[in-house]
Amino acid sequence: MTRRIAAIDCGTNSIRLLVADIDPAAGTLVDVDRRMQIVRLGHGVDKTGRLAPEALERTFAACREYAKTIGELGAERLRFVATSASRDAENRDDFRAGVREILGVEPEVISGDEEARLSFMGATRELAGTAAVATPYLVVDIGGGSTEFVLGTEHPEAARSVDIGCVRMTERHLRDDPPTAAQIAAATVDIEAAIAQAAAAVPMDRARTLVGLAGSVTTVAGIALGLAEYDSTAIHHSRLTLDQVRAVTERLLASTHDERARIPVLHPGRVDVIGAGALVLRTIMERTGLTEVVVSEHDILDGIGWSVAED
């Protein structure tokens, strides 16, 4: 039976809404509405440990818009999931109260392991049984504050979340425009250490296919494909080689803010953090030896949707 559900994923950098018609028995998910706003909820959290008042207000404004859309489209159930920034913040109760007042649901500040499980579900549901995609999958979700590593075939077998998101790495290391060689080197050391930490829990050497999720990965794909504008159909399930990822990463890290802003597929809200996101992806590929990444437009947001429909 088809159910119309709503899912919200609130991360460190963006807040996204999915309204979809899902039939769990048939295994189909049909978008009714899918949208994103860059609200930078986690701006400064790595340094201050708190969500800034202006970041909270940007997020609440997006929630008001999403509440209107959900009501107009008649979704029967909503699940709101919050990830890295709201896990880390001392004042996360202010965030929870605001969301509850606007949307009428309790925001779930989920663990890194649950974030990894939902990302895996959203990314791999369509890949099941695809002969051209070997298993096990290593699903990598590069967010603003953290990156999730999940290994599995039909279900997650091992997962680990580590603090190497694009916003966190930019604020911690890549402060100049463009960043200096020393800053890039320091960020790379940080990323490599986090990958090693994740590898202690996730046997990455077993992976046959790397699946990359979230805005940093999809943006790198759009640049590598030379798209004149962002096209999710062209990006979804595209494949990038390590050489392509290296080339895009080098271009982004050598560019100024204004030069990056002129890249047609690059969302304005990602201009100042995309270099760090690309660096995380490149370093993961280099350290794991996986020389190709399958890019997925479907990720934790879709996983949240499936979890609502199957509940």
Image (cartoon, rainbow, N blue to C red):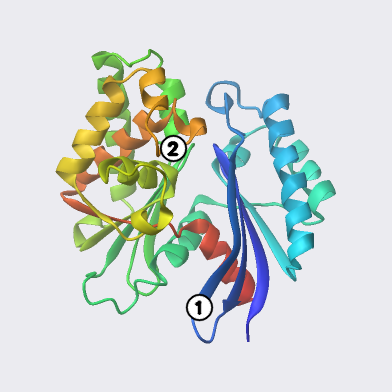
Foreground: 84 or 251?
251
Amino acid carrying mark 1 in the image: Thr
Q: Is residue 253 left or right of residue 144?
A: left
Regarding residue 99, the answer to whether it shows in the image is: yes
User: How many angstroms separate mark 1 from mark 2 (CA)?
Assistant: 33 Å
Vertical position of residue 80 compared to residue 172: above or below: below
The C terminus is located in which quarter?
A: bottom right
Regarding residue 174, the answer to whether it shows in the image is: no
What element does badge 1 sit on?
Answer: strand
Crowd rating for badge 1 (residues with CA inside 10 Å; few <14, some 14–19, many 20+):
some
Provide residue 27's location: percent of width, then percent of height: 49, 80
> Which disc, if any, is residue 163?
2
Crowd rating for badge 2 (residues with CA inside 10 Å; few <14, some 14–19, many 20+):
many
Foreground: 159 or 105?
105
Q: Residue at x 17, y 45 (%)?
A: 242
Amino acid carrying mark 2 in the image: Asp
In the image, farthest residue toward the right: 101
Foreground: 302 or 65?
65
Of badges 1 and 2, the one in the foreground is: 1
**Residue topped by disc 1:** 28
> Which disc, if any, is residue 98?
none
Provide residue 157's location: percent of width, then percent of height: 36, 67
Provide residue 285's location: percent of width, then percent of height: 22, 45
